[in-house]
């Protein structure tokens, strides 16, 4: 293989690695957001569990708009299981499901970070190899 072909192959591999790393970083940010959302949801469910029935609250409609509401039941919640189908579950079970989902998401995040670190090392090696090929 000629020096020019070797440089082209390494450069292509480097560009591909950088693109993959950017995608991993995007996915990592999405997972971080999901973890934060799950933590907020878990906290809200724990607060709801401590709340008495018939408590008056303000419920968010969106974009800073709220409506006065009354909590009728703090023992159970409705969970969307897909296709707009909702299942009534005890609040304890909902908290367990959210904790489990957060744990799985955190594990996925850790694996993604390991993959990104390995890819970063491969990119650095490719950069070094490319510099050595161009120098020689």
Image (tube, grey):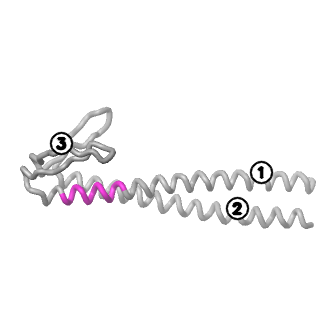
Location of residue 128 by image quarter: bottom right
Q: Position of residue 49 (x, y in %)?
A: 15, 57
If the image is split into quadrants, where does the C terminus sit? bottom right
Mark positioned earlier in the residue sequence (2 or 3): 3
Answer with left or right where residue 67 lies relative to residue 134.
left
The local secondary structure at tag 2 comes to helix
Mark 1 — residue?
12
Asked if the stretch drawn in magenta spans residue 56, the answer is: no
Which residue is depicted at the point 52% across and 58% down? 112
Q: Which residues are magenta?
A: 37-47
Marks 2 and 3 sit apart, C-alpha to C-alpha, by 49 Å
Dots 2, 1 in contact, CB < 8 A? no
Which residue is depicted at the point 59% across and 60% down? 116
Nearer to us in this view, 136 or 60: 60
Answer with left or right where residue 13 lies relative to residue 42.
right
Mark 2 — residue?
123
The local secondary structure at tag 1 comes to helix
Res 88 label: 3
The local secondary structure at tag 3 comes to strand
């Amino acid at each position: 293989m000629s020096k020019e072909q070797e440089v082209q192959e390494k450069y292509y591999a480097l560009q591909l690695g950088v693109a993959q790393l950017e995608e991993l970083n995007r996915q990592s940010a999405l997972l971080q957001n999901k973890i934060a959302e799950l933590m907020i949801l878990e906290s809200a469910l724990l607060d709801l569990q401590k709340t008495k029935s018939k408590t008056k609250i303000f419920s968010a409609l969106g974009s800073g708009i709220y409506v006065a509401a009354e909590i009728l039941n703090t023992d159970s919640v409705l969970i969307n299981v897909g296709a707009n189908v909702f299942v009534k579950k005890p609040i304890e079970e909902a908290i367990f499901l959210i904790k489990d989902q957060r744990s799985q998401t955190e594990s996925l995040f850790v694996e993604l970070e390991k993959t990104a670190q390995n890819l970063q090392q491969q990119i650095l090696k490719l950069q070094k190899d490319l510099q050595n090929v161009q120098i020689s």
